[in-house]
Image (cartoon, rainbow, N blue to C red):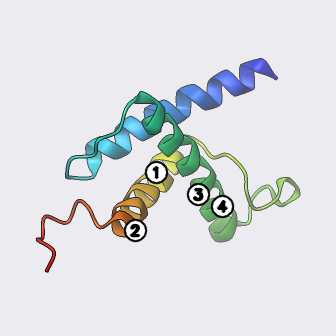
Amino acid sequence: MIGTIIVMLIVGLIAGFIARALVPGRDAMGIGATLVLGLVGSFIGGFLGYLLFNHDGNDGAFQPSGIIGSVIGAIIALLVWRAVNGRGTGRARL
């Protein structure tokens, strides 16, 4: 149990860092926010994997995914976060 939590935290942190590196623009996030971004991305990636491939139907729709799914989900979460906050577009507001 504790090993699973540690692995999820490590994968979440790695996925958050990779997502922040792949999406251009500056984000004022610390390590904790990057970790949360990766964890949220992992569940988004698991949900998308469930919708696209219908794998692990017994686990339910919201499940953690691997590193690739986590990075894709973290990129989606980061773009949604920027769209909601209105930052990262480089355009001036009128």
- Asked which secondary structure carries label 2, the reply is helix
Q: Residues within 10 Å of mark 1 (few under 14, many from 20)?
A: many
The percent position of residue 78, horizontal first and vertical second, equals 40, 55
Label whose residue precedes the other's in the sequence (1 or 2): 1
Q: Residue furthest front?
A: 94
Name which quarter of the figure residue 17 lies in.
top left
Label whose residue precedes the other's in the sequence (1 or 4): 4
Give the quarter of the figure containing the N terminus. Answer: top right
Res 44 label: 3
Q: Is mark 1 in CB contact (under 8 Å) with mark 3?
A: yes
For the residue pair 71 and 31, the one nearer the viewer reads as: 31
Residue carrying label 2: 84
Horizontal side of 66 relative to 28 (left or right) equals: right
- Asked which secondary structure carries label 3, the reply is helix
Residue carrying label 4: 47
Residue carrying label 1: 74
